[in-house]
Image (spheres, rainbow, N blue to C red):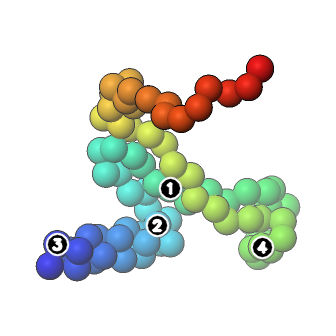
Amino acid sequence: MVADYVRQYYTEAMYQLCNGFAINSGYYTLYMNIGGVFRSPKGGHDPGNHPVGFRVRIGSILKRLAKLVQIEVDGDEPDG
């Protein structure tokens, strides 16, 4: 049941992103980015010159959590 709610959240988030809205979860913000330069206001979208992608901006909550991460390396010592 919880997995279904999560799936519904991401489905709605993808619709919002594809309609040009940013998604702010508190942990991160996702937003669409269109690259390139448009030569005129009436020019159409050319995927080769105007690639569409998504960007992620890390939020303050996730930044604080990252500072708390501790890393332990298990295994043999490297040669050298």
Q: Which of marks 1 and 3 is nearer the N terminus?
A: 3
Q: What amino acid is labelled 3 in the image?
A: Val
CA gap, disc 1 and disc 4: 18 Å
Q: SS class of the residue under badge 3?
A: helix
Callout 1 amino acid:
Tyr
- Which residue is labeled 4 in the image? 47
Image location of residue 74, percent across then percent down = 48, 34
Residue 50 versus residue 4: which sits nearer the camera?
4
Instruction: Residue 56 in the image: state x and y as whole percent.
Output: 51, 49
* Res. 27 image quadrant: top left
Up-down relation of residue 8 to residue 51 (above or below): below
Q: Quadrant of residue 21?
A: bottom left
Q: Which mark is residue 17?
A: 2
User: Who comes first in sequence, dot 4 or dot 3?
Assistant: 3
Q: Can residue 74 be seen in this view?
A: yes
Q: Distance between the residues labelled 1 and 3?
A: 25 Å
For residue 39, above or below residue 11:
above
Whether residues under marks 1 and 2 lie with C-beta atoms below 8 angstroms apart, the answer is: yes
